Amino acid sequence: MRTGFAQIFTGPGQPFHYRRFELPSRLQPGEVLVEIRLATICGSDLHTVDGRRSAPTPCILGHEGVGRVLESDRSGISIGQRVSWTLADSCGHCPACQSWNLPQKCDRLFKYGHASFDNGHGLNGCYASHVVLRSGTTIVPVPDDLSDCLVAPANCALATVVNALSALPERCERVLIQGAGLLGVYATAWLKSLGVDEIYCVDICPTRLNTISQFGGIPLKKGETISPFDLVMEVAGTSQVVADGIELLRSGGHYIWAGMVHPQTKLDITGESIIKKCLTVRGVHNYAPLHLQASIEFLAKNQHAFPFSDLTGPPLKLLDLDRAFELARNNRWLRVCVEP
């Protein structure tokens, strides 16, 4: 009997519970069993553990991961391949999948790290030794020269940024990024690689602003303004920055919202402030498979152009997951890594 293990989340304020389990003896058509090599702690995982967003319990959290294929019931996916995969599993047939180009909003959406332990095989998250990838999940092979720490956050943070920045204003010479977390860092690097020269960033954390400068961004101190901007991108996770973003945009500018993914984001703005400036406002949540593929290609091409390896600390063992979450809360690293 083959066994694996996982850290089970039972609710906010509760410690994780280590559990061993039997690996599936048989995969369903299209499923792939992956042995997890490394996972990272996303901000949404922190929100769940701290009670800012809900999750079915008990469950295995974690959706940013990289691993090797142990078994495959899908053509084109070979045993031993090192892979990453889309955050969402989609049906491929509903209007969101076929007509709207929004598979992440599928009628039968399944999200890794957000499903109960009794859903399917139960191996639904990355804080475990294994995960079962479902038939509607896009799997992307990972180049050998990309480290696990670089790859794991790509299937959430980087792919979301690629999606968010897939439609830029016709003239995009000056950009403001609100928030210098991992999404802000990735956005800075992505825009820099596209040739955008003036990429400014605001954040309440001086350490994070220092990181932005290492990726080609220009930190802005509190009260310092340089406007107008062609594009403003919100990845701060708070609605308190929105009024400033609108004010700092030029007429005809674009505003992208990608960080306000929790309920405590009520807006206090007027329609007039948007209409009179002819602004384009776009909300972005998650991504489509092509954005993950583009993320891996971006890392492969630019891994030596930017100090991506400085964004993560030394991996902790999965048994120390509670400690890993404490490290994630103190902002020492933009991503904390765990490995089985």
Image (tube, helix red, strand yellow):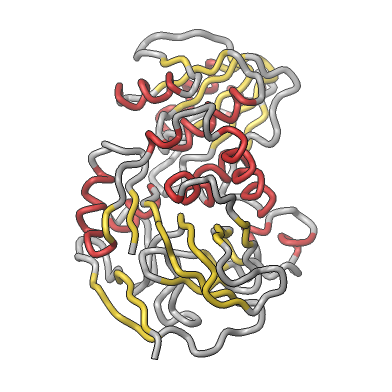
Task: Give the camera-side residue of 158 and 98.
Answer: 158
Q: Quarter-wise, where is residue 316 in the image? A: bottom left
Task: Give the camera-side residue of 210 and 105.
Answer: 210
The N terminus: image quadrant: bottom left
Q: Residue at x 52, y 20 (%)?
A: 176
Q: Position of residue 48 (x, y in %)?
A: 34, 57
- Location of residue 148 with respect to 318 vertically, above or below: above
Q: Residue at x 47, y 44 (%)?
A: 150
- Location of residue 73 with respect to 235 vertically, above or below: below
Give the left or right position of residue 297, taking residue 178 as reference: right
Q: Quarter-wise, where is residue 59 in the image? A: bottom left
Q: Position of residue 98 (x, y in %)?
A: 78, 61
Give the left or right position of residue 7, taking residue 284 as reference: left
- Location of residue 337 with respect to 19 vertically, above or below: above
The C terminus: image quadrant: bottom left
Task: Give the camera-side residue of 55 and 219.
Answer: 219
Q: Residue at x 52, y 45 (%)?
A: 146
Q: Position of residue 214 (x, y in %)?
A: 43, 21
Residue farthest to the right? 99
How many numbered marks are there? 0
Q: Quarter-wise, where is residue 299 in the image? A: top right
Give the left or right position of residue 47, taking residue 302 as reference: left
Q: Residue at x 55, y 60 (%)?
A: 82
Q: Position of residue 125 (x, y in %)?
A: 43, 67
